Every structure is written in structure tokens, then in C-alpha cells.
Image (cartoon, rainbow, N blue to C red):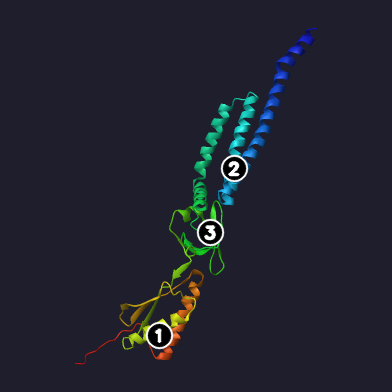
Amino acid sequence: MLENINAQEFLDTYIIPWGINIVMALAIFIVGKIVIGILINVTKKLMLKAKVDALLVNFIASIIKSVMLLFVVIASLNQLGVDTTSLIALVGAAGLAIGLALQGTLQNFASGVMLIIFRPFKDGDFIEAAGVTGTVETIDIFTTTLRTGDNREIIVPNGEIFGGTITNYSKRETRRVDMVFGIGYDDDLKKAKSLIQSILDADERILKDPAASIVVGELADSSVNFNVRPWCKTADYWAIYSDTHENIKLAFDEQGISIPYPQLDIHQQVA
């Protein structure tokens, strides 16, 4: 009889309450995961509808999911009677320690988020940043990958890019091509200017509006220098730059206009 009473008391005191707590903890965990999944899907749809970058959407969603799942686990443990106060303090201390150990990584992460949000450049743009010039291949959370003109791949930490000056050569539809051409002091200035103008007019890639500028920019030591500044579509910049130099050199040679090189005249007096 005593054994039956002890068994009944043990059942009522331990088995049933613990069983209920375990069932409730599992229910909290399962329902919590389902609710988190629904909330994450709704959040993703709202951010994508707001035209937030897909990479940032997935990253933010994963962060929110991890934080919410941590709260669900703590709630489940609390239902089991586990003292979660110390656990929360431990998680906070661990988070602080990890944050201090990963300061550089967190800076790159924060910079990556800012780059994705503000979009100073996008995939395919030709940029200069962090002392590197190249075409943007990918923009990730921690790094940006550039491809140089000679087909090298350079991976730059986002912190170095966002913390410095960014020059985006592809941002605008048009660019001005700045060139300098020198002629000799004995050459016909008006003839040279007219010749340059005719070469620019003959190139259909050069825009008529705004009009090209051809002005004398400097009376240098060995030459009279023209500042030649036509406008073109950004995609045509380098082709026009090289073609114009070649065409003007050939035209000057044909018309007998010299392109002087630096020289020094020495006058010696004979006693």
C-alpha cells in the first residue's frame, strides 16, 4: 500500500507536471517556428516590394530569424523551469566578446549594408575606390569584387570602399573627353584649330550638344597647347580618346603642322 502511495505521489508530483511542461515547451517551439516562418516570408515580400536589394533582403531575414528563434528557445526553456536569466546574460556577454573580436568584420558588414542600400555603384559599373580601378563584378555583404582592365580579379573589403572616395565613371550617360594637343610656335594657330574642329565634326560618336570646346590652354616652353574637350556617351569614351589622338596626329603630319617635344636652346657667347 505504501509503495502504491509513493508511486502515485511520484506520478502526480513529477511525471505529470514534467510531461505537461515538456509538451508545452515543444508546442511553444513548434508554434514559434511556424510563426517565425510566416513573419519572415511576409517581411521578405514587403522588402522586395519596396525594391530592396535581394542580397540585403536575405541577409536581414536571416538575422531576424536567428534573433526570433533565440527568443523562442529561451521561452521554451523557461517553460521547462530552466532559469534563463543567466542564459541571457551569457548570450549577451558572448555577443559582446564576439563583437570586439570581429570589429573589422563588423565594419565591413556595416559598410556592405550601406553600399547595398545607397547604391553608389552597381554590378557592371567602372569605378575607382580604395586605390583600385576596375569593373564591379559582385557586391557582397563583406567585400566587393572588381575586374581590372587586364582581367585580374581584386577583392576589396567594403569598409575600405565606403570609408573613402568613390569615383563612378559609369554613373552618368555622357562624359567629357579632356585632351591636350601642342603645336609649334611657328605653326598656323587658326589652321590647327580648324583642323581639330573638322576631325571632331567628322566623328559621329561625338555629341553636338554640348558642343566640343577647343581653346588655347597654355603657351608652354616648347609648344602652344590646345585644350580639346568633346562630349560623348560614356561607353565611347576610350575609343574616342584613342581615335582622336591618332586622327589629329595623322592630320597634323599631312598638313605640315608640327607637334613639338620639349627642347632646350643653349646660347654660347664666344669671347
Mark pair 3, 1: CA separation: 40 Å
Query: Could you tell which of marks 3 and 1 lies nearer the N-terminus?
Result: 3
As helix, strand or loop, the secondary structure at mark 1 comes to helix
Badge 3 vs badge 1, beta-carbon distance below 8 Å: no
Return the mark for residue 226: none
Going by the numbered disc 3, the residue's amino acid type is Lys
Of helix, strand and loop, which one carries label 3? loop
Q: Decide: is 251 above or below 232.
A: below
At a point 53% along the width and 38% down the height, the residue shown is 95
Q: Quadrant of the rendered structure where residue 3 is?
A: top right
Toward which corner of the image does residue 26 lie, by quadrant?
Answer: top right
What residue does disc 2 label? 43
Nearer to us in this view, 134 or 174:
174
Give me the C-alpha separation between circle 1 and circle 2: 63 Å
- Compare marks 2 and 3 and give the one earlier in the sequence: 2
What crowding class fits label 3: few (fewer than 14 Cα within 10 Å), some (14-19), or many (20 or more)?
Answer: some
- Which quarter of the image is occupied by the N terminus? top right
Q: Residues within 10 Å of mark 2 (few under 14, many from 20)?
A: some
Q: Amino acid at mark 1?
A: Leu
Q: Which residue is mark 1?
A: 195
Q: Quadrant of the C terminus?
A: bottom left
